Amino acid sequence: MRPIPKFLLIHSATLKKESAENVWGKKTNTSTSLSGVRFEPVNVRHWNVQEGLPEATVRMFFDCHNSVPAGTEFDTGDVITFNGRDYKITNVSSLYDERGLHHYEVYLI
């Protein structure tokens, strides 16, 4: 399968990860600038029964060939800032082709 074309990957964002506690019990945050990604609204919302909230409102595409920085990993609970708004990652889907990992679909709320 071919990479997601660059002309579709028109957005940039910031990934914020919270690290583990250091020896003094303080957590630190790291920020990574993402470019060559794509954001789209989620048309179908799955409702979280326990909290009564939608599980995702936006989906971000991160191509393993054309998005930067290469090797970025996403975890549930990380925060992505896009257009001045913070979104929390609720789910990450890793999609593969015949050569390996093709792209991530990151679901945000």
Image (cartoon, rainbow, N blue to C red):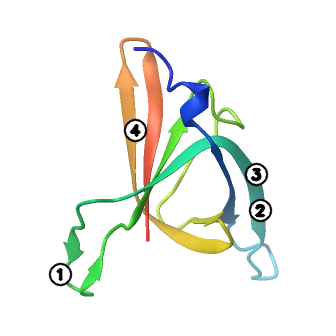
Disc 4 from disc 1: Cα separation? 25 Å
Quadrant location of the N terminus? top left
Q: Is residue 30 above or below residue 33?
A: below
Q: Mark 2 or mark 3, which is nearer to you?
A: 3
Instruction: Report the residue at 44% width, 19% height from top.
Output: 100
Q: Disc count in the image?
A: 4
Q: Amino acid at mark 3?
A: Ser
The amino acid at mark 4 is: Ser
Spot occupied by residue 101 in the image (x, y as percentages of width and height): 45, 26
Label 2 to label 1, Cα distance in Å? Answer: 32 Å
Query: Label 3 belongs to which residue?
Result: 33
Could you tell which of marks 2 and 4 lies nearer the N-terminus? 2
- Mark-to-mark CA distance, 2 and 3: 10 Å
Nearer the N terminus, badge 2 or badge 1?
2
**Rounded to the nearest whole Å, what is the CA distance between mark 1 and mark 3?**
33 Å
- Residue situated in front as seen by the camera: 94 or 85: 85
Dot 3 lies on which element? strand
- Circle 4 crowding by C-alpha within 10 Å: few under 14, some 14–19, many from 20: few
Say few, some or many: other residues with alpha carbon within 10 Å of mark 1 (under 14 / 14 to 19 / 20 or more).
few
**Circle 1 sits in a helix, a strand or a loop, which is it?**
loop
Q: Which residue lies under the disc numbered 4?
A: 94
> In the image, what residue occupies the spot 54% across and 70% down?
87
